[in-house]
Image (cartoon, helix red, strand yellow):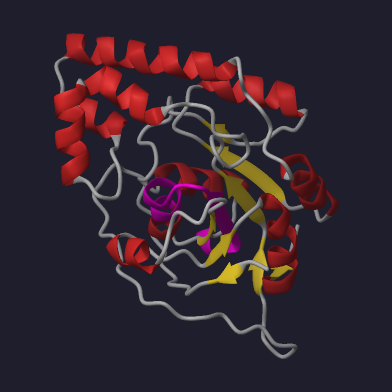
Amino acid sequence: MPSLLSKSLLFTSIYSKSQFPIPHLTMSTFITTATTTKSPLRGVVFDMDGTLTVPVIDFAAMYKAVLGDDEYRRIKAENSSGIDILHHIEKWTPDKQRKAYETILDFERQGLDRLQIMPGAVELCGFLDSKKIRRGLITRNVKEAVDLFHLRSGVMFSPALSREFRPYKPDPAPLLHICSTWEVQPDEVIMVGDSLKDDMVCGKRAGAFTCLLDEKGRYGSSDFAKLVEPDFKVASLAEVQSLLETNFDLMA
C-alpha cells in the first residue's frame, strides 16, 4: 500500500520565472474514512525519465563530463539534495554553455536507444482514460525524447512539456501552464514523479497534490525536512490507481 504523507495547500498564479520559497513541512498522516470528503481530481501530470520510463541515463557520468571531476565533487559536496546541472550551466558563457548542452544531448540520445516504458505506465493511463481524467507530462529532457516515448508507449500526453519550455522544473511555471490549458485549479491536479528536488518541489510550489515514486526507498524524513514532504509516496506505478481511487473524487 502507498504511504500517505502530509498535504500543504499552496496556490499561486505567477507564471514568470521568479523565486518561490520552498516550504519545510512536518510529517503527518492522511486518514481516509467513509465520511471524509474527497478532494476533486481532474488531471494527473507525470514526470517522464524515471517515472514513465525506466531510468537509463548515467547522470553522475553526465555531470562529470560536463563539469570535470574536481568541479563535480565540489558541487556535489555543497548540494546534498543533488546537482541541478541545467541551472548551473545557465551562469556560463554562451560558448561554454553550447559545449555543455552538446554533452548533455549526447548522453540523452544514447538513452533514447535504450528507452523502456516503466511497468504499469500504460495500464495506469488506461485507467485514467476510463475515468476521463486528463494526463500531462513535464520533463527536463528534450522534445525528441518525448516524441520517442509517445511512439514507443502508444500513449499520448497533452500538454507534454520538454525543457524547451522555460522555465523548467522545479519552477512551477510548466505545471501552472498545464493547469491553465486544462482550465482547472492546481489543487485539482496531482504531480507524479521520482525526483524530490524537481517534481515534488514543482508540484508543491504550484499548489498541486504530489506523489513521489520511490522504487528503491531512496528518500526518508531527513530528505523531506531539507526540501518538501510529498503528499503520497509509492514504490511503483501500480500503486497509483488505488491511491487515486481511495483519496480523490475522480472528475472529468
Q: Position of residue 33 (x, y in %)?
A: 70, 87
Q: Residue at x 66, y 28 (%)?
A: 116
Q: Where is residue 240 in the image (x, y as percent from the top left)?
A: 68, 58
Q: Is residue 91 visible?
A: no
Q: Is residue 79 visible?
A: yes
**Placement of the N terminus among the 4 image quadrants:** bottom right
Look at the picture and state if 7 lies above or below 241: below
Q: Residue at x 67, y 45 (%)?
A: 135
Within the magenta stretch, is there residue 190? Answer: yes
Q: Is residue 50 left or right of residue 1?
A: left
Look at the picture and state if 79 lies above or below 48: below
Q: In this view, does 44 lie to the left or right of 238?
A: left
Q: Which of 114 and 198 is in front in this view?
A: 114
**Placement of the C terminus among the 4 image quadrants:** bottom right
Specify the segment rendered in magenta.
186-202
For residue 189, what is the image quadrant?
A: bottom right
